[in-house]
Amino acid sequence: MTDTTILVRKPKLDFSQSIDRFYLGDNAVKTHIFNALNLLFPDGERFFVKSVHDHTKQLSDPQLVRDARAFAGQEGQHAHQHERFFENLAQQGYSFERLLDRFQRLARWSKNVPRSIRLAITAGAEHYTATMAAGLLESGILDECHPTMRDLMTWHALEEIEHKHVAYDVLVACYPKTSYPLRMIGFIAASVVIAGFTFAGLRMLLVQDGKRGRLTRAKFEADRKKLNEGRELRFRKKLRVALLKYLMPGFHPSQQDDREVLERFTPQVAQITGL
Ligand SMILES: [Fe+2]
Ligand SMILES: [Fe+2]
């Protein structure tokens, strides 16, 4: 357990049409990695909330029950705000219904999977979101982002760090004897789904840009090359190390010390959300 306060904030974000197509440093590849994740967040986060909610009656620790409620509040807001951005993507000429449909079918099918595994997938996926969030805020990658999208991602990232322990602690509280093998099954499944759908979404958006003359081969190559340089490369290297820590038997999300990043970005998020 950690003593981080989990605040449910409601940002006022203006997703007007002034958001550039390649809003992250005019880089098509980086922007579409974010867009691909953005498309997965609403249904993914509803899956997370349901997986944790399915276990709250089993919890005896009142603090963990409160954290689970706050977790649901935060994830519900994330899903809502990311879904609002879908309209911008559609107006920019992207079609993504097939990808969403495939993801939603997988989410519906997952109801056949034991709820213990769904919770383990959530705990694994939450390690991804918290790790990516901390890396994103620390790296400065968002410095060159359109202000609305920077606010969206800064707020979401901070809250992922705040609630990073919740699904994990619910998993360990509900399945203490089998938590390590269960945790590994969940992590592997989460890795396959996140990597598979993010890559599929990235490819889908880049292909659409290429076909409609919005992205030349030369720009694509130049943008892709930038992922292997500077802070992007450092971000990826750190991310890999931090993600693999989940495999350690004694791992707990609180072992990753994010206090500095929380302190640095909480005032910024207070300005975005009023809380
Ligand atoms: Fe979230
Ligand atoms: Fe989360």
Image (spheres, grey):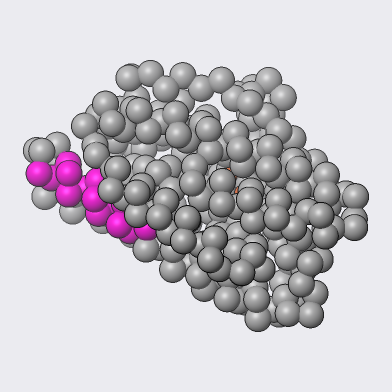
The magenta region covers: 197-211
Q: Up-down: is 102 above or below 248?
A: above
User: Residue 171: which quarter of the image?
Assistant: bottom right
Q: Up-down: is 173 above or below 206?
A: below
Q: Up-down: is 272 above or below 67?
A: above
Q: In percent of the image, x 60 and y 76: which residue is there?
A: 184
> Does residue 192 appear left or right of residue 181 in this picture?
left
> Does residue 80 appear left or right of residue 162 in this picture?
left
* Residue 5 shows in the view: yes
Foreground pick, 54 / 19: 54
* Magenta-span inclusion, residue 118: no
Foreground pick, 9 / 258: 9
**Which x, y percent locates residue 220?**
19, 49
User: Residue 90: which quarter of the image?
Assistant: top left
Q: In percent of the image, x 84 and y 58: which residue is there?
A: 59
Q: In percent of the image, x 82 and y 60: which residue is there?
A: 58
* Residue 230 shows in the view: no
Q: Quadrant of the C terminus?
A: top right
**Which x, y percent locates residue 193?**
44, 63
> Does residue 215 appear left or right of residue 102 in this picture?
left
Q: Up-down: is 93 above or below 137?
A: above
* Magenta-span inclusion, residue 206: yes
Foreground pick, 123 / 261: 123
